[in-house]
């Protein structure tokens, strides 16, 4: 089968190689093989490409967390009814290929009215957002949330789920060109972080804004800022460290990132009844695939009921993977970015 291998760490333009490799072998009873029709890109892939993601497999490796396709083989014959079904599945890497292996317990069948792009958006991005906003914390109508990188895939999903919950949304972006997108997606107060300090901007409002929850995938000094903005009983959900991608590999730069984030004593959180919650979807997919399957099915219902509107406008062909990766890292796109394998060339 054809696959894109990551052969070294570095720039997207020269680290991927289009290769022929054997199809994955099904070893565990829960294993199924999927003929892939499309796969999605995620920021963890960017981190892995740059050698900054410890969970990534050793080189040469095949990245990719999520695929849409048809199940063509099962290990356990009691699952043979799944053969031929179009499904959405999370993968423990290995998604950048014509065939991918995954665990049947995390697979969901797709209705015909859900496109490949929409389905892929529902996977990592919307699952992360759902766990963060609907599972880890409890929000009430008219509360205000702060969302970092609000124009990205997870930010888009968080905004839509927050509006579904009846909340007000402050959305951050680095690009003034994305403000219109944020407003169209439901953001009540967009802030361009390259033009003003978001903490000062929020605190300068005539009516004091109390932040019930912050969703942060940036890390660095933003964590300290966010904690100063949290209301009593507020929660900070920390699900990524994109700030780390701006630095080189090595222990020094990792320690520098930890220093910028700072230390937090539980007593201070106790005093204000606040909390910091870490969220890693990969570990949930590994250890609790049944939870992932439940969330995916809930998201499919919300999409079909038009309660959420996954954005997946940036579709690339197979040979355009390096271009898609590069643009994703540079923040050129909004919503979900994915690779279409139909007519692979």
Image (cartoon, helix red, strand yellow):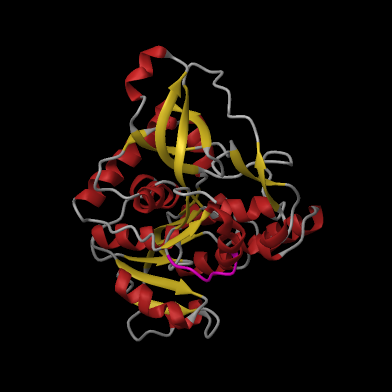
Name the residue located 24 percent from the left edge and 58 percent from the top edge. 164
Name the residue located 74 percent from the left edge and 55 percent from the top edge. 254
Residue 63: percent from left, percent from top: 60, 44
Q: Quadrant of residue 209?
A: bottom left
Residue 338 within the magenta-colored segment of the rendering: no
Residue 89: percent from left, percent from top: 43, 37
Q: Nearer the viewer, residue 126 or 73?
A: 73
> Where is 288 relative to 96, above or below?
above
For the N terminus, the image quarter is top right
Query: Furthest-left residue in view?
Result: 305
Residue 69 is at least partly visible in this image: yes
Boundaries of the magenta span: 329-334
Residue 3: percent from left, percent from top: 60, 42
Q: Quadrant of residue 162?
A: bottom left
Q: Quadrant of residue 205?
A: bottom left
Query: Furthest-top residue in view?
Result: 77
Name the residue located 67 percent from the left edge and 48 percent from the top edge. 53
> Where is 7 relative to 13, above or below?
above
Per the picture, the main secondary structure of the magenta-coloured stretch is: loop
């Amino acid at each position: 089968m054809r696959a894109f291998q990551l052969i070294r760490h570095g720039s997207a333009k020269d680290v991927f190689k289009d290769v022929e490799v054997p199809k994955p072998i099904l070893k565990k009873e829960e294993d199924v093989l999927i003929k892939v029709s499309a796969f999605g890109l995620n920021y963890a892939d960017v981190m892995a490409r740059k050698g900054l993601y410890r969970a990534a497999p050793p080189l040469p490796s095949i990245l990719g967390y999520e695929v849409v396709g048809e199940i063509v083989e099962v290990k356990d014959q009691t699952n043979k009814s799944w053969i031929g079904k179009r499904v959405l599945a999370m993968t423990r890497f290995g998604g950048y290929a014509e065939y991918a292996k995954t665990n049947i317990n995390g697979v969901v069948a797709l209705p015909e009215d859900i496109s490949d792009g929409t389905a892929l958006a529902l996977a990592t991005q919307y699952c992360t957002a759902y766990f963060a906003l609907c599972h880890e914390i409890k929000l009430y109508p008219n509360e205000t949330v702060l969302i970092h990188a609000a124009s990205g895939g997870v930010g888009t999903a968080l905004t839509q789920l927050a509006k579904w919950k009846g909340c007000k949304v402050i959305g951050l972006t680095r690009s003034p060109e994305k403000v219109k997108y944020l407003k169209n997606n439901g953001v009540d107060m967009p802030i361009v972080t390259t033009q003003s300090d978001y903490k000062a901007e929020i605190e300068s409002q005539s009516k004091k804004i109390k932040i019930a929850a912050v969703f942060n995938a940036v890390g660095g000094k933003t964590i300290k800022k966010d904690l100063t903005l949290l209301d009593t009983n507020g929660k900070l959900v920390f699900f990524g460290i994109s700030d780390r991608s701006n630095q080189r590999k090595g222990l020094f730069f990792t320690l520098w990132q930890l220093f910028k984030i700072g230390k937090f004593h539980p007593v201070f959180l106790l005093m204000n009844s606040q909390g910091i919650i870490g969220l890693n979807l990969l570990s949930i997919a590994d250890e609790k695939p049944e939870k992932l399957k439940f969330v995916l099915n809930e998201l499919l219902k919300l999409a079909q009921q038009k309660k959420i509107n996954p954005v997946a406008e940036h579709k690339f062909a197979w040979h355009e993977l390096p271009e898609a990766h590069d643009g994703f890292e540079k923040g050129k796109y909004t919503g979900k970015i994915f690779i279409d394998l139909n007519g692979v060339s």
